[in-house]
């Protein structure tokens, strides 16, 4: 029960932080792309709760949640998104370049299919250092169609890497639907097992299911049996930018009402209430989280931009 309450707190942080960032975007305060994770929080929190602090995770273009769930600082995240010097990537990367190495969040990059091979390299290093630690790579269903994903599966099985790939299947890559438009016969499990990699699927709207399946798979991963966990989720907002995008007409089955009915945060809240936690104490958590998020955003808004000289640091050419 403690775990579920902690999960509620963490999922609320992810949700509220992004809802507030969405408002900033609409006020033209965010000058770069943002891809919000709202609706998918049970995955990042469910998987992170199955990891130890020294395990590593890597993400993609939609990784605010992965970073925060692994313990990344909200202040440094908001500073990064606003391009401020105190940002987790020095204000040079923006929303798609979350990083918190001290918390085991090794980094995120938006090039689809790139992160699985980088994560395999991390797992390779862990294996040879005999640390018993693992690496997790978060990717979307669209990224799982890239060739690099299959190459990684092959090498991970061959080298017995301590690697868990979490595929967050929200049924869309930008506005293209998985079934009919991108795949004639989608069956990720058969393909993945065909490479000799373990596979399980989870209801990504359900913290418990994600957490249980991740824990089970990670026991094998720590013994050098790489695995994929496919989590079925709904992305509540548009692909990029904060608007709800049903008006564009490309969503047929997962309409807004359905997404909200399956909302992962609502599910955790309902379970806690069933277990005897009061509505008031949950509302109190929400109020405190809102206040915390507001403070960090205020701080980031008035924080300085990087010194222009910084343009010439961290260059490799
Ligand atoms: C190699 C590459 N091709 C195209 C893009 C442009 N792009 C950014 S996100 C995205 C869709 C990703 O879909 P998915 O992997 O399902 O993740 P989701 O956005 O649904 O979380 C595309 C095509 C890219 N970033 N990298
Ligand atoms: Mg997708």
Image: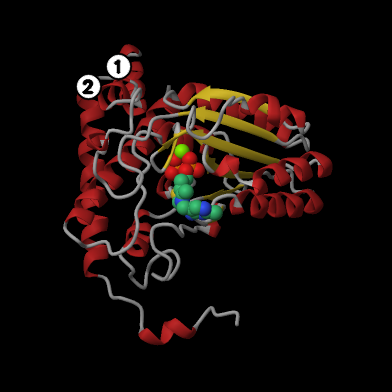
Q: How is the image coloured?
A: secondary structure
Of residues 138 and 5, which is closer to you in this image?
Answer: 138
Q: Could you say which is closer to the camera, residue 177 or residue 11?
A: 177
Q: Secondary structure at mark 2?
A: helix
| Residue under the image location 57 percent in, 46 percent down | 53
**Disc marking residue 273:** 1
**In the image: residue 64, left or right of residue 21:** right
Q: Decide: is 164 above or below 86.
A: above
Rendering coords of residue 14 (x, y %): 35, 42
The answer to whether 156 appears left or right of 184 in the picture is right
Give percent across and percent down for residue 156. Answer: 76, 43
> Which residue lies at the image location 37% right of the left edge and 26% below the top edge?
264
Residue nearer the viewer, 172 or 43: 172
The correct choice, above or below, for 188 with respect to 57 in the image is above
**Residue 289 in view in this figure:** yes
Q: Which residue is mark 2?
A: 279
How dense is the environment of label 1, judged by Cα within 10 Å: few (below 14), some, or many (20 and up)? Answer: few
Residue depicted at 46% across the width and 60% down the height: 97
Query: Can you tell which quarter of the image residue 245 is in?
Result: top left
Inter-mark Cα distance, 1 to 2:
7 Å
Q: Quadrant of the N terminus?
A: top left
> Quick one: which residue is furthest to the top in this view?
274
Q: Between residue 28 and residue 291, name the one nearer to us.
A: 28
Per the image, label 1 sits on a secondary structure element best described as helix
- Residue 161 appears in which quarter of the rendering? top right
Q: Position of residue 7 (x, y in %)?
A: 41, 32
304 in relation to 79, above or below? below
Q: Are marks 1 and 2 in contact (CB under 8 Å)?
A: yes
């Amino acid at each position: 029960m403690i775990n579920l309450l902690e999960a509620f707190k963490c999922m609320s942080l992810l949700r509220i932080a992004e809802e507030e960032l969405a408002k900033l975007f609409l006020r033209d305060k965010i000058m770069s792309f943002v891809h919000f994770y709202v609706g998918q929080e049970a995955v990042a929190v469910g998987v992170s709760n199955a990891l130890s602090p020294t395990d590593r995770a890597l993400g993609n273009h939609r990784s605010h949640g992965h970073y925060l769930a692994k313990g990344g600082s909200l202040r440094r995240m908001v500073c990064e998104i606003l391009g401020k010097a105190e940002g987790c990537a020095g204000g040079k990367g923006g929303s798609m370049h979350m990083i918190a190495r001290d918390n085991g969040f090794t980094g995120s990059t938006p090039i689809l299919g790139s992160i699985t091979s980088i994560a395999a390299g991390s797992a390779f290093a862990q294996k040879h250092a005999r640390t018993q630690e693992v690496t997790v790579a978060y990717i979307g269903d669209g990224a799982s169609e890239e060739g690099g994903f299959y190459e990684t599966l092959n090498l991970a099985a061959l080298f017995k890497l301590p690697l868990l790939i979490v595929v967050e299947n929200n049924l869309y890559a930008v506005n293209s639907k998985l079934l009919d438009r991108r795949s004639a016969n989608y069956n990720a499990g058969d393909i993945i097992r065909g490479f000799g990699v373990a596979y399980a699927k989870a209801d990504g709207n359900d913290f418990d299911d994600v957490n249980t399946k991740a824990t089970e798979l990670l026991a094998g991963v720590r013994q050098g049996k790489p695995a994929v966990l496919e989590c079925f989720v709904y992305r509540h907002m548009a692909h990029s930018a904060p608007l709800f995008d049903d008006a564009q007409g490309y969503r047929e089955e997962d309409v807004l009402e359905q997404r909200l009915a399956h909302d992962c945060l609502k599910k955790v809240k309902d379970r806690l209430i069933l277990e005897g936690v009061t509505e008031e104490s949950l509302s109190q958590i929400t109020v405190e989280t809102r206040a915390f998020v507001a403070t960090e955003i205020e701080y980031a808004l008035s924080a300085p931009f990087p010194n222009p000289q910084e343009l010439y640091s961290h260059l490799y050419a």
